[in-house]
Image: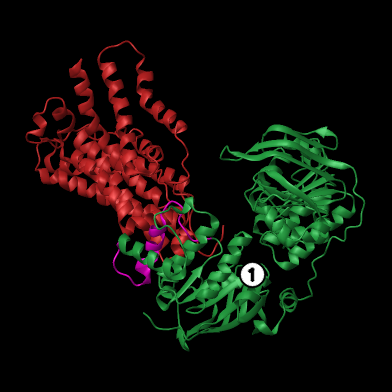
Chain colours: A green, B red
Amino acid sequence: MDRRIKSLKMEHITKTFPGVLATDDISISVGEGEVLALVGENGAGKTTLMNILMGLYQPDEGQIFINDVPVHFKGPEDAFRAGLGMVHQTYMLVANMTVTENVALGYRNAGEKHFDLKTVRRRIEEVSSRYGLMVNPDAYIWQLSVGEQQKVELVKTLCLGARFLILDEPTSALTPQEVDELIVLLQRMTKELSIIFISHKLQEVKALSNKVTILRHGKVVFSGNTDDYSSQEIAAKMTGHDIVLPMNEGGKKRGETVLSVQNAVVMSDRKTPALNNLNLDISAGEIVGLAGVSGNGQRELAEAINGLRKVESGNIVFLGKDITNKTPREIIDAGMGYIPEERNTEGIVPPFSIKENFVLKDVSSGLFSSACFINGKKIDATAEKLVKRFDVRCPGIDTAAGSLSGGNIQKVILAREIERHPKFLVAVYPTRGLDMGAVEFIHSELLKIRESGIGILLISEELDEIMNLSDRIAVIYKGSIQRVLDKKEATRERLGILMAGVKEE
Amino acid sequence: MLDIITNMLSMCIPFSVALLLASIGEMFNQRAGVFNLGCEGVMAMGAFVGMLIPFLAGHGGPVSEWYNVLGFVAAALLGALFGLFFGLITVTFRAPQGIAGIGLQMFGVGTAGTLFRHFVGGTQSIPGIPDIEIPLLSKIPFLGDVFFSHNIMAYLAYILVPVAWYVLFKTYWGLKVRAVGTNPRAADSMGINVSRTRYEALIVGGALAGLAGAYLSIAQAKMFSDSLISGRGFIAVALVYFGHWHPVQIMGGALLFTFAQTFQTIVQSMGISFPYELAVMLPYVLVIVVLSFTSRNQITAPTALGKPFNREIRT
């Protein structure tokens, strides 16, 4: 049971899913106490490879070796027994059970015969004090924030005896503060454990790993020591070309005010005030970045502007017309474009084809229909054009939009919104969870829209994104605007202080 | 007046047993993520087999108690078999559960009726099982009649409520059942066999539905007819939602429904002039009304209810 894992190797792993070669002859190796960063764009095969390591998928070819002895995992229970544990990107927790119950779920498969919640609870307390991972064993998962849930995942994996950790994009859902905490925590843990972690954030790769392996399209394209390479070099190897994120060069006169939010008061889902007398003006041809810790009213502001949430008091004026509490249809017709937060549930209808998703907002306008009949040829022609122009990687325009990767779904949404020639665009977390290549594309498209004289409200939790793209930066805190800074005045430190709610004199 | 109330309340417990057994069984199904609309059909088969065994043994005359026991056991086994069959369709072949359930309901009700006409023919009664008066307790006025003078199955069914609670919340198997019905992917990643756990829950649920049917024919009606189940299987499914997948709340629902039913029976028997069609509707309307006003508590709900699980297909 307490055998140490001195080395772990995966050799020549190949796995195909219907129509997709997910991993193609991949080999990796990790030694004791090492941290391997597995880096690559979305869909490069990182998660598939780790699921194979955990016994969740069976490889078509290839073998796994622990301490140079070949092993075969039929399921995750075998991997647990060998001392492996994985924290998945979407947390594998049962929401209506307590922390203790969630840990107990895997206990029997980790070699413990006895089922006794008290023992499990004691073990949780042991592990959490040993690694400084504070969790309340009696809390229900649904009561916990995303950051706390991740701690539960780590505690769970450690309780089950993992001496080799696999972390799948551990920071993708965390706030910047939580990310910093996690990195410190993992650095401490590397003294006792070996870790493989999947990421495409190069900062973390540099901060944590000794070795880096880069995957692209299911193949290993590079392996080496992290310290020997700069972030830029790793980024270039990851995408296959040099990535330079485009910047807003500024240097344009501000136009007329297009969108004006005046003293808006809006309620959250929990019926507490989400926006408190919020005021914000945005002009034509500028990007205003809305910075803030998520949950400070960003979502509610975007929904109120787009007619999806009731404005209790105050006004929203768009191109001189009052659009407060108008229907989404009226607001769309007035020229509003919207990239919603949840691309899979709000941005597209997943089972509809790509071409159908392109024309969702126009079917009633007569643009793609005559009388009550849809004009199929015109839709096809438009869709082919957009797929080409926005480089949507898909088998064809009849593919279900929901089967695409996150980056390509976002391109479909962006294409739809831009093709409709909006007079203003609200973009909410437009690059969340996307890889560098897709981020680069979306950023340059947003800047192009700005060039053409359209105002953009960019809501994001990535400070770099906001600082690169914005003309002005508004900081939101507890439902009102703390301050609006000019691009030149904004530094990371200053924004951080404002985001934390500290007023400037 | 007190007589009428005592009478009404003392009918409540024995009449609620079939609903209670079936809905606790359905609760295990749904907690594991499978809803079995075929409960009605399984109950019909259980009722038929449960009645057939003591009937063949005594041809309507008195029989040894053991034939009744055999009837219940056979009904439970047959129900378990139906649960296994339903698992094959919905877990292994991943058929849509709603359609499969309706199929099972029609199959069960139709087969039970057909076999009944072949083996029994017309209306035939069996002796049934006696009430057990619990010494001392049954002598307490009012309470004795309401709580302590029922048949053995009624007592067992009510003991099942805390047992089901214990199994669901305090055992490893219950933990697995709740996990595969709420987040099967998580359960899978913890090394739990999702399909196997769902099968097990379906077998338990089926056995309880079979027992529920046998209770109706052996203990309650002491006969079988095509209309014996008359929608109780569907009410059982509704009661699971009503009781938020919790055994104690489900028991409350079963009692409330039965109370409404006995209330309308007694009102009719008292000769109050009230259209009986409306009176018969009362308990069903009550269930719909309560269901539409209860909060949809996403927190306790088995969120994977109705969704087949396939490890290698991401949803």
Q: Which residue reaches farthest top? A: B273
Say left or right for A504 vs A69: right
The image position of residue B1, as x and y in percent, is 20, 15
| Quadrant occupied by the C terminus of chain B | bottom right
Tell me the residue at 52%/73% (across/down): A166
Q: Nearer the viewer, residue A351 or A448?
A: A448
Q: Which residues are magenta?
A: A91-116
Say left or right for B150 vs B102: left
The image position of residue A295, as x and y in percent, is 62, 49
Q: Which residue reaches farthest front? A: A505
For the residue marked with disc 1, what is the amino acid? Val
- Tell me the quarter of the picture where residue A406 sits: bottom right
Q: Is residue A38 visible?
A: yes
Which residue is identified by label 1? A20
Q: Is residue A152 magenta-colored? A: no
Question: In the rendered structure, the residue with mark 1 lies on which chain?
Answer: A
Counting other residues with Cα less than 10 Å from the Cα at mark 1, is it few (<14), some (14-19), or many (20 or more)?
few
Image height of B172 relative to B305, above or below: below
The image position of residue A106, as x and y in percent, is 39, 65
The image position of residue A417, as x and y in percent, is 79, 49
Q: Nearer the viewer, residue B30 or A159?
A: A159
Image height of A218 relative to A409, above or below: below
